[in-house]
Amino acid sequence: DIVMTQSPDSLAVSLGERATINCKSSQSVLSSSNNKNFLAWFQQKPGQPPKLLIYWASTRGSGVPDRFSGSGSATDFTLTITSLQAEDVAVYYCQQYYGSPLTFGGGTKVEIK
Amino acid sequence: EVQLVESGGGLVQPGGSLRLSCAASGFTFSTYWMNWVRQAPGKGLEWVANIKDDGSVTHYVDSVKGRFTISRDNGKNSLYLQMNSLRVEDTAVYYCAGAVGWIIDDWGQGTLVTVSS
């Protein structure tokens, strides 16, 4: 199984500042057949189901603000929230869909400082 | 608008069974891979199982293999999860989730399964 490890577990950022979340996979999720990284990011607010933010490591989902961006390749990935807004308080998860079982990182809780 | 509505959760004793259902609307259900993802109270997300658009292929996480069965009825736009031999550690909110390929892009609100004596 591909193990997804996120860091940090939590972070507090001032409004308008940058938040950076890291995700490392235990093996590469870069496909040689299409040169794409099978990596997604989800946002989960309290009492709500998760919402897809990013797929293919860097493609924003429908309606996702451009302050959210994803980067990285193979085994190391980053989710960046530029200019943090109050509504961004949530837990963020990375997830690989390269192979079964699909696996999630442990989550990173983002709060306002 | 995509809607996924789960039902069938509840309290069950260890060793018991439950069948979860998910009613889908607002999209062409028969063209989507479908998933069950669970979240134990206060914990992270765990993928449980998925099923191909035509129902011909299924995958499971090891911890539920042989106990859970995912199925679908494209004529009824419905997804199911038959859960047998339930354990305390299966206690979680179970989400129905639709995927394009394996990219999960739509989620239901979830149904709570509690396994306790």
Image: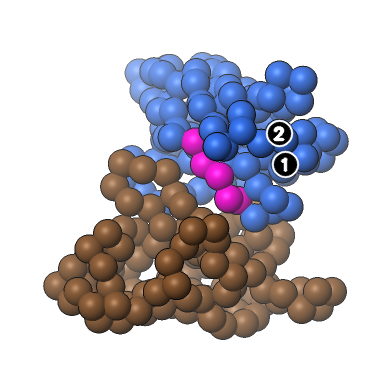
Is label 1 in contact with label 2 (beta carbons under 8 Å)?
yes
For the N terminus of chain B, the quadrant is top right
Residue drawn at point x = 58 percent, y = 26 percent = B22
Q: Dot 2: few (<14), some (14–19), or many (≥20) neighbours within 10 Å?
A: many
Residue matched to label 2: B29
Disc 2 sits on a residue from what chain? B
Residue B19 visible in the snapshot: yes
Lateral position of residue B10 relative to residue A24, left or right:
left
Lateral position of residue B2 relative to residue B14, left or right:
right
> How would you classify the magenta stretch by its main secondary structure?
strand
B101 w.r.t. A64: above or below: above
The chain whose colour is brown is A
Q: B26 or A107, which lies in front?
A: B26
Please identify the quarter of the rendering in which residue B56 is found.
Answer: top right
Find the magenta span and give its range: B104-108
Q: CA distance from mark 1 to mark 2?
A: 6 Å
- Residue B64 locus on image (x, y percent): 61, 37
Lateral position of residue B58 relative to residue B46, left or right:
right
Residue matched to label 1: B32
Q: A64 or B34, which lies in front?
A: A64
Disc 1 is placed on an element classified as loop
Q: Residue type at mark 2: give it.
A: Phe
Chain B's colour?
blue
A73 w.r.t. B7: above or below: below
A44 w.r.t. A27: above or below: above
- Residue A96 locus on image (x, y percent): 61, 63
The magenta stretch spans residue B26: no
Residue drawn at point x = 44 percent, y = 49 percent = A50
The magenta stretch spans residue B106: yes
Q: Dot 1: few (<14), some (14–19), or many (≥20) neighbours within 10 Å?
A: some
Q: Residue type at mark 1: give it.
A: Tyr
- Residue A1 locus on image (x, y percent): 64, 61
